[in-house]
Amino acid sequence: KKALKSSPSIRGVVWVKFTVAPSGKVLSASVKRSDIQAPGFTSALLRYVKKLRFEPIAGSAGDMKFVFPFEFAPE
């Protein structure tokens, strides 16, 4: 939201690939594809994703990998 306030014209989708441990902690996150070419914006998004916590799952499931689209548009 902070980046959108300083650059209200930011618009597009950032596809983030991330890995979640059975504990619910995000182990890694990276940009798979992005319509937004603003390095400061995408690095802030990755910091946010790395702080996310999910509900724990059975340890036998192993690490889970996801690709999720984050869509941004001016309000």
Image: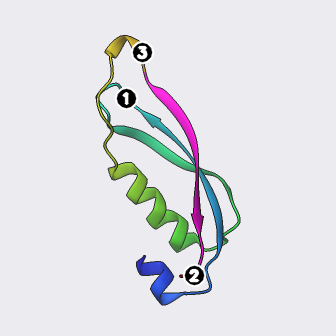
Task: Rate crowding at label 3 as few (under 14), some (14 to 19) or many (20 or more) other CA atoms within 10 Å.
Answer: few
Relative to residue 33, is residue 44 drawn left or right? left
Q: Secondary structure at mark 1?
A: loop
Give whichever of 34, 74 is nearer the camera. 74
Q: Which residue is mark 1?
A: 21
Give the foreground label among 1 and 2: 2
Residue 13 percent coordinates (x, y): 65, 62
Nearer-N-terminus badge (3/2): 3
Distance between the alpha carbons at the discs numbered 1 and 2: 33 Å
Q: Name above or below for residue 18 compared with residue 73.
A: above
Foreground residue among 4 and 29:
4
| Label 3 or label 1, whichever comes before in sequence order | 1
Question: Callout 3, which amino acid?
Answer: Ala
Indicate the secondary structure of the residue bearing disc 2: loop
Q: Main secondary structure of the magenta part?
A: strand
Say which mark, if any, is on residue 61.
3
Please give the label number shown on residue 74.
2
Number of numbered discs on residues: 3
Is residue 45 shown above or below 27?
Answer: below
Mark 3 or 2, closer to the camera: 2
Numbered tag placed on residue 30 in the rendering: none
Q: Amino acid at mark 1?
A: Ala
At mark 3, the secondary structure is helix
Start and end of the magenta stretch? 63-74
Residue at 57% in and 81% down: 74
Q: Residues within 10 Å of mark 2 (few under 14, many from 20)?
A: few
Q: Residues within 10 Å of mark 1 (few under 14, many from 20)?
A: many
Task: Answer with left or right where residue 40 lies relative to residue 36.
Answer: left
Q: CA distance from mark 3 to mark 2?
A: 39 Å
Q: Earlier in the sequence, mark 1 or mark 2?
A: 1
